[in-house]
């Protein structure tokens, strides 16, 4: 498939969830949706690599999931709205801890930044 190049493709640090990333990340996002059921979260915890394989994740996607490298998962097509399910399934990660990791901040620094935005 041929993808159209967009202006935002060249903005460093910008990972727009458009058609290309949606197609690339479909296996990740489908897997994340499976975590709506506790039985699947337990299977994932027992053997994350096998669970990723069940959904057809690439080796790079699988490694990013196992490493809980949230920014890399987004770069590989993971939708941030589904990643919360993955964080919880993997061991109790929160959206704030994911955001902190992606921005290179501590969780407390990230929370403070969010509160500062709220005051503006």
Image (cartoon, rainbow, N blue to C red):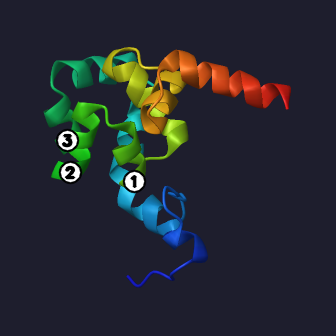
Which residue is label 3 attached to? 63
Give the structural element (helix, strand or loop) at label 2: helix
Which residue is label 1 attached to? 75
Label 2 vs 1, first from the N-terminus: 2
Please tell me which residue lies in front, 12 or 90.
Answer: 12
Q: Are marks 3 and 2 in contact (CB under 8 Å)?
A: yes
Q: Are marks 2 and 1 in contact (CB under 8 Å)?
A: no
Give the structural element (helix, strand or loop) at label 3: helix
Which residue is label 2 attached to? 60
Q: Are marks 3 and 1 in contact (CB under 8 Å)?
A: no
Query: Where 95 sits versus 74, above or below?
Result: above
Q: Position of residue 38 (x, y in %)?
A: 38, 17
Mark pair 3, 1: CA separation? 13 Å
Mark pair 3, 2: CA separation? 5 Å
Please tell me which residue lies in front, 103 or 3.
Answer: 103
Residue at x 33%, y 50% (from the top left corner): 27
Please tell me which residue lies in front, 118 or 22.
Answer: 118
Q: Can residue 70 be seen in this snapshot?
A: yes
Q: Position of residue 81 (x, y in %)?
A: 55, 38
């Amino acid at each position: 498939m041929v993808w159209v190049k967009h202006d935002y493709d060249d903005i460093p640090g910008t990972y727009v969830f458009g058609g290309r990333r949606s197609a690339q990340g479909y296996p990740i996002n489908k897997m994340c949706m499976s975590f709506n059921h506790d039985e699947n979260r337990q299977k994932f915890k027992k053997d994350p690599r096998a669970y990723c394989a069940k959904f057809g994740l690439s080796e790079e996607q699988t490694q990013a999931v196992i490493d809980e490298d949230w920014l890399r998962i987004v770069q590989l097509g993971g939708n941030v709205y589904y990643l919360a399910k993955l964080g919880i399934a993997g061991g109790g990660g929160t959206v704030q801890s994911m955001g902190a990791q992606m921005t290179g901040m501590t969780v407390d620094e990230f929370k403070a930044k969010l509160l500062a935005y709220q005051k503006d």
